[in-house]
Image: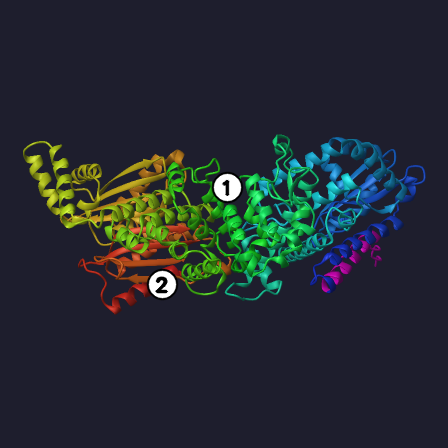
Amino acid sequence: MATPAPKNKYKRFAEHLVQRKRELVQTLFESGDRLFLQQNAQLLDDYFRECFEASDIGPRMDIARNPYAIIAQGGYGRQEQCLHSDVDLLLLFNKDIPPQAETLIQEVVYPLWDIGLEIGHATRTLKECISLAATDYEVLTSLLDARFVCGLSPLYTSLMEQLRGKILGRRAKKIVRWLVDTNTVRHQRFGDSAFLLEPNLKEGQGGLRDYHTMLWVARITSDIKQPRDLEYHGLLSHNEYQELDRALAFIWKVRNRLHGLTGRKSDQLHFEHQTRLAKALGYSKADGQQPVERFLGDLHGQMEIIKQQHLMFLYELGHEKHRLRRRLQIKKSGVDGIVVLKGNVLGFSAPETLLEAPILLIKIFEESARLKIPLSTEANRLVREFLHLVDDPFRTHPETIQAFEKILATPVLEFNVLNEMTNTGLLVALLPEMGAIVNRIQYDEYHLYPVDKHSLRALQVLKGFGTPLSLANDPFCDDLYKAIKHRKRLLWATMLHDIGKGTPGGDHAKKGALVAEQLMTRLGYAPGDIETVSALVRDHLLLIKAATRRDIYDEETAIVCARQIQTVDRLKMLFLLTVADSIATGPKAWNEWTAALLRALFFRVLKIMEKGELASREAVSMVEEKKRRVIEEAAPGEARTQMEKLFAVMSPRYLLYVPTEEMKNHIRLHRELGDREFVWQIDHSEEIGTRTVTVCAKDRPGLFSRIAGIFTLNGIDVLDAQVFTWRNNVALDIFQVTPPPDQIFEYERWGRAERDLTEALAGRLDLTAALSEKLDRRRSSRPEAMERSPQINVDNESSSFFTIVEVFADDSPGLLFGITNALFQCRLDVWVAKIATRADQVVDVFYVRDFDGQKVDTADHVTEIHTTISAVVSGQDP
């Protein structure tokens, strides 16, 4: 029997590495701090040194005549080796690369690949390294992190000396400029991680790469050897370095845990990992927040620290916004004790001036807004260190309030001054109530930003109206903002509109109104200011909810809003606050369709306020004028007689709310209907990117549900619907929908949808089965923490003629068909539908009557509606 071949010694080294790494994970992984990263790198060092000492090919390479060394690069070089990070390696030779080098790679690197490590390696001579580093700055940055592992150390020393003498000493400015420009591109690609729902822990702004850039710049300009030298060389203060170190430790801990959960290198914090990470990191529910919300709040806060330190580090050294700097003229401060320093940043003339005049703590931000230049790093340090001077007399001093109002009102393109105040802690020191919403996360796909950043962004959007900074792209908003008389009330309300989210439970708008009232009272504002700000905070969701959840053509909707808002000035302020709030929330909250609905509601409410509620006599006169204009254009004789008969079967609601030109078109469709089951017309709205589908059909129970199902089957989303039933058994359903998915073949898709509806109405297409097959392929998973219990409201109070059914549920394909089919099973006809999808959750609102034309007025029927719709939204058969 043959004796087994002895195991390859390099494989034994690799297996030993795996065993030691398991032990390291068991002992240090829980802490997740820098020690784990260093020890993980040390394990690799030990492996390479063992291989070097035991190498079979090494002695034949004549290290004395042609020295070589194994050098760590990248995260491995910095000794920041996370659990599944790549291992970057350089095999460096003095003069020539011998033929045996490939065999050495096989000895050292191949066993690591076999155990699943990702190894990036390069084999170069000293001359090649310097030549490549001079032309390829990616190679250069990897060499900036280089660390000797084994071999001949003088070769490594020579590499670093030549790197500094031949490249860094001659091209420092050019290299740093490239680093800054590369950073800008990277930030544009990966976004601001301190704001994103799924941040990139490494490449996003506020991620680890920002810290690496600080190190590289400091190594180029100050020749630092280790991260702690950032403090020793005066580039960061002691407190700043400690703050940076804590932020890095937290992010490394998260990154290591993410590697552990995914079993691979991973930097993008996707939704599916967030709840598991929060649990693994020991977060629990507190202060009305889920564990994942608290975790993400802390993560955003730590990434914000890195982002701010990175920005100020580059700005202070004169490397950030270099193009802007060349155009700027040196400005002068008009406040004693505040000076404009070299590089166009603001500073204090001396630290002791703050003790003599604490008001300078806020005055410097007022000057920052006026001059549109930021504070220096040292000024930010001093603001943090002197926050103890901000007491109640300071907060309520007229000069403090006046300075803060100027900061509130001044638009600044380059940066958000209030964000800078938040980063130093001054904003919370001035307004302690803001502390409850700092880095407070709302865990959904709708809100892009933490509550504090969203509130300040909304304020920034508002201040941009009427300036080149305007994000609304709407001259109407610009003109309206310019005409506001009491602008400070609107500014305060916008900043405080979500302040109630810092208090757990209940209606955040009502809670926020109370907080705003208390805050404004403490600051000594007049009763008129307090009452208006409080009312705006209380009602900041009124218009957007009415526009997207109620029938804006129903006069009752406008009347309810008008009675709540009370004055035209407040209506204008509330409209602007709503626009700013929606834009600041994110693109899924603000689009052309939402803007059109909101503006239409605004003008209806304004008309009610200016002219009073529509009188019956005026309504009759309006309807008669419409009839006259339509009949005048009809042919004489028999056609006019038929037209008059047709008007007799139209519902009063239709006659009152449908414009004359649309009536003419509907009458034409009615003539085309004849003996067919339905006809439809599709109109394009290029301005808001939607389609209007007008369906004229023979009325039947469940018609609306079938049409909605056909739209879903063809990938078309319903945004809004109006249903009119004439007394001759003709239904006129008007849908606002999104275009079909592939607009190149839009005409063909509409033709297919028309055929599908024909088949469904004839009973030859089983819609439920067809949708089930399609939707099984489209189902998507959502993190458990994002899932909310469905909410179903049956409202018999808001409308005199309809029962309003509101459905709040997690979005899923085919949900609208399921809900409308459930309403049909409950013997209800849909007359108006408002379909609002908030990224991850739908708010579907239906104005319904029973088959006898009455409101839902029995408790049993209301219970049946709840039960049937609940079964649909929970994925069960109703």
| Range of residues picked out in magenta | 1-26
Q: Is residue 203 magenta?
A: no
Q: Is residue 416 left or right of residue 47?
A: left
Q: Is residue 2 magenta?
A: yes
- What secondary structure predominates along the stretch shown in magenta? helix
Counting from the top left corner in percent of width and height, residue 277 is at 60, 60
**For residue 807, which quarter of the picture?**
bottom left
Residue 878 shows in this picture:
no
Q: Is residue 439 above or below residue 188?
A: below
Mark 1 lies on residue: 411
Quarter holding the C terminus is: bottom left
Quarter holding the N terminus is: bottom right
Give the distance between the C-alpha atoms of the residues marked 1 and 2, in whole angstroms: 48 Å
In the foreground, 272 or 47: 272
Does label 1 or label 2 sit earlier along the sequence? 1
Counting from the top left corner in percent of width and height, residue 61 is at 90, 40
Q: Is residue 792 above or below residue 759?
A: below
Q: Which mark is residue 870?
A: 2
